[in-house]
Image: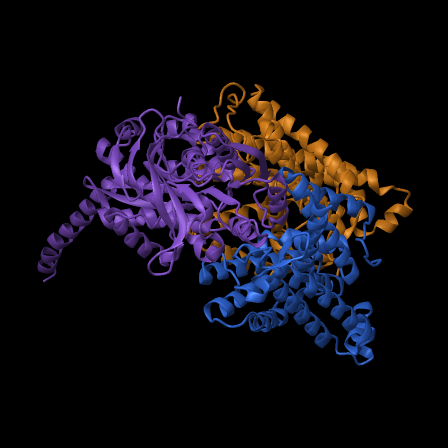
Chain colours: A blue, B purple, C orange
Amino acid sequence: MQTALSIAMDALAYGMALFIICIGLSLTMGLMRVVNLAHGAFAMIGGYIASYAARDLGLGYAFAIVLAMIGTVIIAVPLERLLYRRIYDRSELSQVLMTIGITFCVIGITNYFFGPTLKTIPLPAELARSVDLGFRSIAGHRLFVIASGLVVAGGLWFLIERTGFGIHLRAAVENAPMARTLGIRTEIIYAASFALAIGLAAFGGVVGAEFLPIEPYYALRYMVTFLVVVSVGGAGSIAGALAACLLLGAIDVTARYLVPDFGNFFFYLAVILVVCAFPRGLMGRAQ
Amino acid sequence: MTKGFLNRLLPAGALALAGALTLSASAWADTIKVGIIGPFSGPFALQGKNFQAGAEAWLAQNGKTVAGHDIELVYRDLPTANPQQARALAQELIVRDKVQYLGGVYFTPDAMAITPLLKQGNVPLVIFNAATSAIMNSSPLVVRTSFTLGQTTTPLGKAAVERGVKKFVSIVSDYGPGVDAEGAFKKAIEAAGGEVKEAIRIPLNTTEFSPIMQRIRDAGAEGVFAFLPSGPPTLGFVKAFSDTGLKKAGVKLFAPGDLTQESDLPALGEAAAGLITSFHYAVSHESEINKRFVAAAEKAIGAPDLLSFPAVGAYDGMFVISKMIAATAGKQDAEKAVEAVKGLGWESPRGPVKIDPETRHITQTIYLREVAKDAQGRWINKEIASVPEQKDPGLAK
Amino acid sequence: MASGMPVPASTGRTLGRDLLGLALIALVGLAGYWLFPDNLAFLTRVISVALLVLSLDLIVGYCGIASLGQGALYGAGAYAAGIACVHGVTDPVLLILIGAAAGAVMGLLMGAIMLRAHGLPQLVLSIAIVQLLHEAANKASSITGGSDGLSGMSPAPLFGLFEFDLWGRSAYLFGLGLLLIVFAVLRFVTRSPFGMVCRGLKEDPLRISALGIYAFPVLLKMFVISGTVAGMGGALAAIATQVVGLDSVSFEVSANALVMLVLGGIGHLYGALIGTVIFMALEHIVAAINPFHWMTLVGAVLIAIVLFAPRGLSGTLDELARLLTRDRWRAGR
């Protein structure tokens, strides 16, 4: 029982870390219809900025997170204007090709400037401490990740379902020409939600760095995982992404405990079964 | 006027032409090419850079000429294990670039793809890294200057029991070297009177280790033996070991030195402090030769904290190749070249080493090290004991 | 739709053009043999990958099913041929057939699973399948050699005469012959009524089903054909390299194949060949010039392709040819 609780705790933390990184991708893919394989690259850029700020400049953790999010968005906005805007209406294949290209470039450039070694983001003392939960001790950082995941999920739900921006965004997604005639500036809406997705990626890259360490190949190494998680959840659905992350996180962590030598076998088996049972994703909308 | 001009011009021209010809002819005859295959880009680029740094450090110290023959290094990139590409690259180096020696090779499958070509190409292969024992049996033209997991792991068994740690959980990445390490450790610890209660193999790409730590806790082990390739898995493992409280609870971690590669130490930091590893080389090894080697290699690699063990494999590999060149007087004769270095012993930056005449694998001292801070506050692998003249137990008959 | 539907033409003319195309491929292949006699191992690799990309074109270009898991079929062929060779089947032609059969079986399985979904989930299924096989091949190391790779095969000389040696001449010519045969068959298949139905399903599934045609068996059949071709590519690689590594059944191989296909242009078999040759040559040359930072350049090329040659290289060539000949009506605009 104690073991089961302990595993559940780990699964929750891991699933939440995945959720924070992936939810931005789910938004771009579901709402903006762009298969952005470079999403992980932006998470990685966030991680690098935070590592530089916290380790080399000695700034605080919270400040490093904010800096990482702003910095990554600043890097991403010109890319949106120059590159992404041209593939919004193109086929999925073109999008895949272009975003793989962007990922390659980001990896090459990162490798050139920062070298191939791992980068760590030093945690503040409060988060680095182990917290005793009674049945086990857990790194305080993991509790922080779980809390962040809940805040992100709640915040996004509120933003999309309850605010004016959310209404405009949903309108632009459902019927862009109609939204435009009603005076909604869809370009700005798109740019804003792209920036939001990138900001979330950077946030996820930083807080998830203890699970998925920051190094130049981050962008390629976890590309498949991110894409799979989002598709299983159903692109564009917050609840779906959350459910997929928790489910797949739990399967991954449990399989790793029970049958570690089978590796990702059960993870991908679960993916196949879920997609066969829910061909549109757990909570995907009809296309 | 015209005639005078021509008269003056002709001899000068002829001289220049003749000069150019002899120059190019001598350069042609005397340049011996060495092909080096390694991961120079991709996730393992750091290891490739270390190959390059080690080889160039050797050239910087010994000059680019061996016994009157110029050496030219030809690098070829093989980012990840890919035997098909390895064979294509090796074939091209032999047939088109006419290299007389092949060196490098980071992964075992790549080495296995190259060895069948050696005999026909009349080219010896000096392996700077690929560490599975069995490669040596695949061709008599292979010499290895790195290490095998059996070699580096075996001394850990006795060291652990001496420290009163007997009940172990073994955790290795599920691939050739990992399986080698698991087997060698089991044998060594049982010989010393300890036991492995549980042996777990995990996939190569694992980065989240909390469930594994739970397994260790449940098994009630006193010690953990771990082998993972360096990079993200190592960092995740050492962090999780300390985060989940196992380290504080007094569980001891023993590992081959791959786990605390010098280039990872700054990232591992406090989490790795006190960790005991065994390996054939530490960048901080105390010797005059090593100091000079490190200075040259750091210059070649650019940033001092990138330097780690593949560099010394490459450096010694270049030494072996130079001896081969000297022994064959620059002629291409793979068998004679390999024959010449069998039993060759020398003082390497890692300590005294020797090419075992039977297996063609390097015999060397294995050091027991502890992660600690040096006088300048940098994390290093501090040597605390040494076991001299270790052969590869995987190949010993 | 600007393209896709072939121009109706008399059978005689089509046959003539096909023969011309085949002759062109043979010519380029032989030119490669004479011009780069020292790079034959690399060129053999190109042919093996070209077979993989061709097989992917059948699924992506002719059926409109995006797949990032084609490596599953390629790897199945490679491992089947490799394992058979280690166990004493050494005739190269037989090994190719074994690879083809293994690829076909895997294609049947993969198609049966993938055809359950559409769009993005379908793409994810393909990734999951190749990853699953990768894990399985790693786990079954007693049969596959695991991450150390399967080694120790020594294929017999081709037709008892030509050895697979260091210079790789027989491997290359063998591969070239195989490619020509496969290409000829595929031209025929894609132009057959069956191929037309596949295209139709891609362009307008509703209308095809209104004709009373049930899509599933048609697409499944194409998956089997695609698996056969990819399996042959894998078997060729196994024979030429004499080692099979886990990389042959990986996401990386699959993703590279898709990139090459889109680069060359989907939906015409020539595009698959052009894309493979250009991409691999580019990678090879850039990696040889600067082995340390070639990735950035390859990435930049990919971006440029999407921006400036949206229909792939072969599509752009078509467009150019059309502009030059002012043959506008063919574009269907």
Apparent side of residue B359 relative to residue A112 in the rendered image (left or right): left
Q: Is residue C31 above or below residue C298?
A: above
Q: Total marks drawn? A: 0
Rendered position, B366 above or below A238: above
Report x, y in % for residue A174: 82, 68
> Could you tell whether C154 is left or right of B70 in the image?
right
Residue at the (70%, 38%) spot, across then down: C226
Who is closer to the viewer here, C115 or A227? A227
Asked which quadrant contains residue C37, the reply is top left
- Furthest toward the bottom, the residue is A183
Instruction: Identify which residue is drawn at 62% across, 66% down.
Output: A203
Quarter placement of the N terminus of chain C? bottom right
Q: Is residue A98 above or below residue B29?
A: below
Would you say residue C37 is visible in this rendering? no
Residue C239: x and y in percent read 54, 29
Height in image: A125 above or below C78?
below
State the residue in front, C223 or B61: B61
Q: Position of residue A67 (x, y in %)?
A: 56, 73
Task: Work out whether residue B73 can be spotted.
Answer: yes
Nearest to the observer: residue A200 or residue A223 = A200
> Residue A266 placed where, x, y %?
70, 41
Which residue is nearer to you in this view: C42 or C72? C72
- Which quadrant would residue C293 be assigned to in this image? bottom left
Relative side of B263 to C226, left or right: left
Q: Is residue A87 left or right of residue B155?
A: right
- Which image quadrant: the C terminus of chain C? bottom right
